[in-house]
Image (cartoon, grey):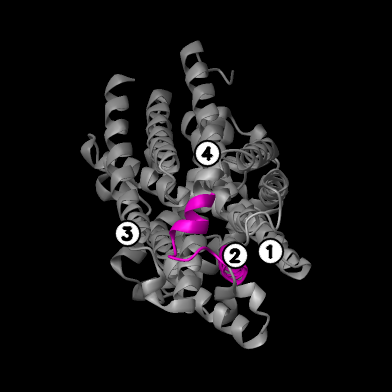
Amino acid sequence: MFGLDTTLTVLLIVCLVMACFFEFINGFHDTANAVATVIYTNSMKPTVAVVYSGLLNFTGVMLGGIAVAMGIVNLLPMDALIDANPYHGIALVLALLLSAIIWNFGTWYFGIPSSSSHTLIGSILGIGLAFYFLPGEFGLTAVNWDKAKDTGLALLLSPLIGFSVAIIVMYIFKRLIKNEAIYKEPIPGKKPPLWIRMLLWLTCGMVSFFHGQNDGQKGVGLIMLILISVLPTHFSVDSSVNLQSINGNVERIEALMMKADTTVLAAKEKKLYSDLIKHSEHFKIETTGKFSSNDVPVANRFSLRTDVFKITKGADKMIKGGNLTLSKNEIGSLEKEIKATKKLVEYAPSWVIIIISVCLGLGTMVGWKRIVKTVGEKIGKQHMSYAQGASAEIVASIGIGLASWKGVPVSTTHMLSSGIAGSMVAKKGLKNLQKGTIKTIALTWLLTLPVTIILSGGLFLLFRAIL
């Protein structure tokens, strides 16, 4: 398969199966948060709720685009880390997958609402940091720190935003809805009024759909990491994109950059400028007379990916540096051309998206009970009311939807559990929280990154020594 020997083929299949298993775990781990409110409040039967949520997760992945997926892929500078030995790529993805699965499965087993996003990103960062201990000149450059900083900030702020906004939503509920039924704990076996059920159906559906858009894309990004690491010449660029169209984008980027006054650039910016021009010329030469990456010799295809990254990343950094002597309109045109050029490398085959959609949807339909009990009964001293469930899901769906739109990964678990905590505080203050559960969730939140970084980094160095 793709010119790989039998051992590599088996290892590649194992990695792909493990990626699917991670997304399956993500389904019953994270998506349990989405169905917790409708199940706990008797608004929907468990079997109906998980199928409903699973279908909307599937739809969310299929319609969600790939902005978040590319955010995951771009955490590691693949153009620098990939070498001629495909077993090194296997070592990378095996370590990443094993560490993510171990932590995700362990926290689910103990019923702790933990973040799959944190887990995956910690595992990726662990791989990047492990390169510091390998021969070569990677150092700390084996992690895309600009992307890591944006991702880390989103993961840090999401629970704080969920907690705060849920308090505000509960306040709005109390001001606008005077029906006391919505603020009472569910009566076991008794359905709430229809309008409350419809509200909870809607919010559950929104969380499920946006979870698919955001978390599902992480699975897509994970499989693309595997394919690019092990088969870089086959999956480094999108063969369906017209190379002459991208060539035109590259020429326009180069022409705009040529207008800039290089004498005012800082030393690092001059290096970026030089690399941009060099890779622009190489890309144009390599793609002359070729309309698809299939027309480019297999051995040269990955160099096209490197060219695009050097061109677009260099131009992006120089725009942010603020020293480009271009007009506002020219900067706008440059940003437009950069975005168009990235289409060659920021993609995922349709079969990858379908596989992840199915795995996430199926995972949603099992294993939900442990997390539902924690969310419904163990965050607050009182059991969750209808209003509290609805407010937490409104906050979570809006937060996850905005993050997906911006192409930033956030934690569904953190958004929803912090939203429920906020709704509990809105009712009776901080004394209404169960300190033991909050401490466990907070400790897991704090430990996820360091544990997965150490675990994945250690496994990567071990596998590199073995393979």
Decide which of tag 1 and tag 4 comes sooner along the chain: 4
Q: Nearer the viewer, mark 3 or mark 4?
A: 3
Label annotation for residue 393 = 2
Classed neighbour count for the residue bearing mark 1: other residues with Cα under 10 Å, few (<14), some (14–19), many (≥20): many
Q: Is the magenta stretch mostly helix, strand or loop?
A: helix
Residue ID at (31%, 55%): 443
Q: Position of residue 160 (x, y in %)?
A: 42, 70
Decide which of tag 1 and tag 2 comes sooner along the chain: 1
Cα–Cα span, label 1 and label 4: 24 Å
Decide which of tag 2 and tag 4 comes sooner along the chain: 4
Q: Between residues 20 and 45, which one lies in front from this camera angle?
A: 45
Residue of label 1: 200
Decide which of tag 3 and tag 4 comes sooner along the chain: 4
Start-end of magenta stretch? 372-401
Residue of label 4: 25
Query: What kind of element bears circle 2?
Result: helix
Cα–Cα span, label 3 and label 2: 22 Å
Considering the image in quadrants, where does the N terminus appear? Answer: top right
* Label pair 1/2, CB-CB below 8 angstroms: yes
Tag 3: amino acid: Lys
Decide if residue 127 is on the left or right side of residue 193.
left
Query: What kind of element bears circle 3?
Result: helix
Decide which of tag 1 and tag 3 comes sooner along the chain: 1
Tag 2: amino acid: Glu
Q: Which of marks 1 and 2 is in front?
A: 1
Label annotation for residue 439 = 3
